[in-house]
Amino acid sequence: MRKKLVAGNWKMHGSLVENAALLAAIKPALQGIEAAVCVPFPYLGQAQAALAGSSIAWGAQNLSEQTKGAFTGEVSAAMLVDFGCRYVIVGHSERRSLYGESDELVAKKYMAAQAAGLTPILCVGELLAEREAGVTEAVVARQLDAVIAAAGVASLARAVVAYEPVWAIGTGKTATPEQAQAVHAFIRSKVAALDVGVAAGLVIQYGGSVKASNAAELFIQPDIDGGLIGGASLVADEFVAICRAAAK
Ligand code: PGA
């Protein structure tokens, strides 16, 4: 059976004081449960110090596609490795829509992450208008194809995919388990058409207003392998309950 993985996406939230309390609350509660938190860059050292030796991994929410050089303000994959990161989110819808990241740039970031030994969490998902226009599968396929074309299908054995319908992110509107499962099954079948083994092992997270109250019904779906959690990952009890739901 595939493992389930829940990852928190703190986005641009937190402070040294708030993070210390959150990390101190989730660490003992998740003992033995594999989970991850993706924190803002300045707090990577704090996450590393707090979580080293625990079952909770840490990572970042973005990285540069470049390895080093005159790229003011950018952070490389090697720097994330320096801070013990295991994961890095690439292609989050907020990066795509607010910062203009193209499918091609996302693919470059994905490859830069893997080249350094990080596991990219590749986000895909459609806008509300795209769902209403009936092009959800076409959009998700295009986003996945850009990565497969650049890095090859075999690279997905060292990645996590997160399906995040943009209309469900931070809106309180969760996709129904059936809606999410349908897209997850589509993603897996698309990968299976190229490599059955990679598809069978691929962890596909759902993201978009996951809460303790709806996690179980999502995670029970056959192709939903955990979640990428925004708002609820900032609330210790919520995040712990979601991780426990995935571990059942
Ligand atoms: P949300 O965010 O759980 O707050 O909807 C999910 C995400 O953007 O990763």
Image (tube, rainbow, N blue to C red):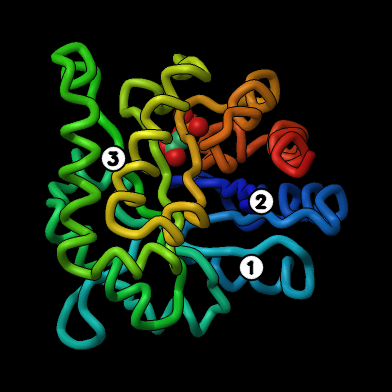
Whether 144 is drawn above or below 82: the answer is above
Q: Which residue is mark 3?
A: 93
Q: Are marks 2 and 3 in contact (CB under 8 Å)?
A: no
Q: Residue at x 26, y 47 (%)?
A: 95
Q: Nearer the viewer, residue 69 or 84?
A: 84
Q: Are marks 1 and 2 in contact (CB under 8 Å)?
A: no
Report how far apart the C-alphas of labels 2 and 3 lie in the structure. 29 Å
Which amino acid type is shown beneath numbered disc 3?
Ser
SS assignment at label 2? loop
SS assignment at label 3? helix
Q: Earlier in the sequence, mark 1 or mark 2?
A: 2
Q: Nearer the viewer, residue 41 or 53?
A: 53
Q: Residues within 10 Å of mark 2 (few under 14, many from 20)?
A: few
Residue 1, numbered label: 2
Q: Which residue is mark 1?
A: 46
Report how far apart the C-alphas of labels 1 and 3 lie in the structure. 26 Å
Q: Please provide percent x and percent y for residue 102.
A: 12, 51
Disc 2 or disc 3, which is closer to the eye? 2
**Extreme residue toward the bottom, this view:** 69
Q: Is residue 13 left or right of residue 238?
A: left
Q: Please provide percent x and percent y for residue 81.
A: 48, 81
Q: Residue at x 49, y 65 (%)?
A: 87
